[in-house]
Image (spheres, grey):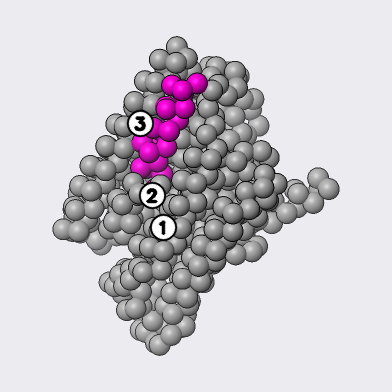
Amino acid sequence: MIAQTLLALLILFIPVASYAAYCFAGKSSLIVGGGLNVAVAGLMYFGPDLSGIFYIDFTTWVFVIMVASVHFLSVTYATKYFHGTDLGIRENTFYLLMSLFTTSMFFSLEINNFGLMWVGIEATTISSSLLLIAEKTETSLEATWRYLVLVSAGVTFAFLSIILIFYSLGTLDVSSIISHGPEASPVLALAVTIALMGFGTKVGIFPVHTWLPDAHSESPAPVSAMFSGVLLPTALYVLYRVYEIDPLTPLYLWAGVVSIAAASIFLGYQTRYKRMFAYSTMENMNLALIGFAIGGTAGITGALLLLISHSFAKAGAFYTSGSIFKASGLKKISEIKGLWKSMPASSASLLMSSLAVTGAPPFGTFFGEFLIFYGLLSMHYYFPLAIIAFFLVTAFIAVNHNVSGMLFDGESSYSEPGKVMPFLGILSSAIPVLIGLVFVVVYLETL
């Protein structure tokens, strides 16, 4: 238990320590620190569950390894992406904010107190909002303002749910509340409902999602990867922990269904590739929400498998988007043509990531979706399942049609922006394949 607690503390300490080392030893310290955090997060898997200062079980660990991995990839990518770029903020300020942003996510995941979880989520809002304006364009300033206003309003609303939980149960200790199992009462039902709209603002639940496409499309590529890959899942984790107190399955299920439908419809009308991927994130987060809502082995496992696979796939999509933008300076889907011949590495990454985020086999996202579908079937949610399936197919067609046009239509004279950025795109996009294959092997061994 002591060793596991020390590992949890290290997870919080390393991002800030690596930034301090960066001030003296350069960018390599950030990369080494990111890699060390992945290793520490990996070691936590072999330790026991914690329920003292920190509350860490297998579900928590999945989110922690997710944040550590995507942060490592993103900070490595950023060291190349910003090379020769005139930033709107000082480069060392950017890396400080990245470190604080990552630490606040780890804090939100690990801490054993709903009130402090809320503090952690609010801290992610403050640190990440400043990252949005790194390139300091007029549109990024507008996106930052919208993000701050909407998300802060939502998180403030969520604080009311925390107050109601304390009023009803007399404690905010996560492990104590969860160990007692679900408790039904009008006050707790109200708290869980308010949390859906409060924390749901940061998850991307319709109709409080409107900050999401602008924030993703206007932020630098490594920041977009962090937003889609780990920030939204971190908020979803907190929402899920609140949901466990008094599971309102129909409410959360239909909120997810409506949000998936909205995301799929909006996605089909997008003209910019980063906004398209942003709506894809909204769709995936709400499908994971449905998995958590229905519960059971299939629902929870499916949600976790979907989220960790999506985190790498979507990071790969945004890394590749950054490479395309660095090479072309263009943001519209219709303006990008012939990438397959001119940028083969980025093209392979874009193809894999687009298939992964839309749930194609053999990516882990496919198996996550399959398990959630199985959970819906086993609980006889046939009508919601039919709606979800229809809109997932619609999104699959829309995303991959747009991507195929960017890859195979016409010709271009772009060139890859170095070797590291395309490599990180390919690596991140390929990891969901490995996750899917590992899942199949583990599943077959249980038969």
- Which x, y percent locates residue 395? 48, 65
Q: Amino acid at mark 1?
A: Ala
Dots 2, 1 in contact, CB < 8 A: yes
- Which x, y percent locates residue 151? 30, 41
- Which x, y percent locates residue 367? 65, 55
- Dominant secondary structure of the residues highlighted in magenta in the image: helix
- Is 346 or 157 nearer to us in this picture? 157
Q: Which residue is mark 2?
A: 206
Magenta part of the protein: which range? 185-204
Q: Which residue is mark 3?
A: 158
Q: Which residue is mark 1?
A: 262
Q: Amino acid at mark 2?
A: Phe
Query: What is the crowding at mark 1: few (fewer than 14 residues within 10 Å), some, or many (at least 20)?
Result: some
**First reached walking from the N terminus: tag 2 or tag 1:** 2
Q: Residue furthest left?
A: 138
Does residue 386 show up?
A: yes
**First reached walking from the N terminus: tag 3 or tag 2:** 3
**First reached walking from the N terminus: tag 3 or tag 1:** 3
